[in-house]
Amino acid sequence: MTEAAAVPAGRRPESSSVVHHWPVDHLDGLDVDPLLRRLVRDEPVARVRMRYGEGDAWLVTSYEHVKKVTADPRFSRALTVGRPVTSMTPHTVAPAGGIGRTDPPDHTRLRRLVSRSFDRRRAALLRVDAEGTADRLVAAMTALGPPADLTEALTGPMPERLIGTLLGLPATDFARIQAWRRVLLSSDRSLRESDAVKAEIAVYFRELADLRSREPRDDLFSDLVAARTAGTLSGPELISLTLMVVLNTLDQVLNQAATMVYTLLVHPAELARLRADPVLLPGAVEELLRFVPQRNGVGLPRIAVTDVPVGEVLIRAGEAVHVSYLAANRDPRVFTDPDRLDLTRNEAPHLAFGSGTHYCLGAALARMQCEVILSTLLRELPGLRLAGAPQEVRWRRGTVNRGPEALPVCW
């Protein structure tokens, strides 16, 4: 990818007169977007324009400023509804009224309804189930013999089975749910395709909610249906909340865990360190979360409610703001030699799961699954290696989140 071009933006606030045209090209492996790499070092609050939407928006990349914006109630997610803010996708993944596009107190109410199912305590209870699932999946993979596609054998089915248990979704429905995921978390599907899938999803979850209202189970979806019956959750909120839980949980682990394995396999010295001392694993997962460039572009924007100074820039009321957690995780002001993988790094907490009010609900669950997958592979397959050259691995295209399309391995 060539570095984004900088062009005059017409009448802008006095703090910025340049807009960077950002195509958000697809990148392979562990490559970091060159515009993000430059901005975090030289222009931590900049203006960008992407392929879709209208106008331009601020892009905040430094660790300090990202933390500030995501914690400041003067930046609103709810005000993005109905605003065609410049974006890398022709459609908005998060539905209006869903947890990703609300502010407190509505956001607080929605988050409280699901937070108990995604906290560290619940993740610990699910860990035994996850370990058994990982053992069975790895055993089935090794029984067939090498080579194997790790995304098909382990990192794909693992989150699918856990989210099925957590939400009580029928296993027979996951082929359809995965097809929906591929459309909604794409960067090149049309608005028409996205709207059609969202309509299908609404029918599916309405029918499932009616069933759970008659035959409740001990799962998160039944809890949400009960909240709808009690009047603390609306029907559209039930659908959007469940959808975001399903999409984020499935896609995060599928891509993150596979890319973590790839990262270790192409950093043999760090892998040898981890194999020699498995106690390092929890810290290693945190460093991998910081190091792995897990998405293309940026996520949902915010709208400034009033004028807010961020660094040396004044962001005006009504202006759109994007933040880049990926860039913040490579901020040289915070991380020593940020482009180096160091499994014993002990610096600031990474921002891979976001920050502030909209910190990822599924962080504990995703972190636990990544730990289980890596620990199982380290224990059961000490000779694990790529089944070809690193440059032969195919990486996903047309997606919001990055990851290998397939990860061929042998042992």
Image (spheres, rainbow, N blue to C red):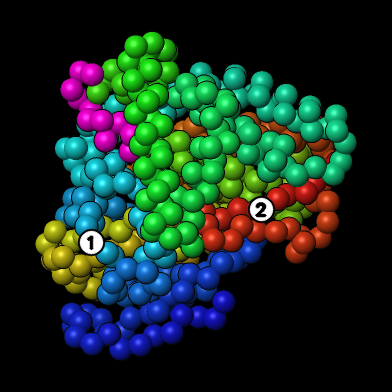
Indicate the quadrant containing the N terminus: top left, top right, bottom left or bottom right: bottom right
Tag of residue 143: none
- Identify the amino acid type marked 1: Arg
Count of all numbered marks drawn on residues in the image: 2
Q: Residue at x 76, y 39 (%)?
A: 276
Tell me the crowding category of disc 1: few under 14, some 14 to 19, or many 20 or more residues within 10 angstroms, Cα based. few
In the image shown, does 165 or 68 lie closer to the viewer?
Answer: 165
In the image shown, does 313 or 94 lie closer to the viewer?
Answer: 94
Residue 41 visible to an observer of this rendering? no
Tag of residue 405: 2
**Horizontal arrangement in the rendering, residue 88 relative to residue 148 (left or right):** left
Indicate the quadrant containing the C terminus: top left, top right, bottom left or bottom right: top right
Q: Earlier in the sequence, mark 1 or mark 2?
A: 1
What is the span of residues highlighted in magenta in the rendered image?
229-242
**Horizontal arrangement in the rendering, residue 261 relative to residue 173 (left or right):** right
Above or below: residue 113 compared with residue 44: above
Helix, strand or loop at mark 1 = loop
- Identify the amino acid type marked 2: Glu
Helix, strand or loop at mark 2 = loop
Is 355 covered by the magenta stretch? no
Q: Residue at x 42, y 69 (%)?
A: 40
Residue at mark 1: 83
Q: Residue at x 18, y 22 (%)?
A: 231
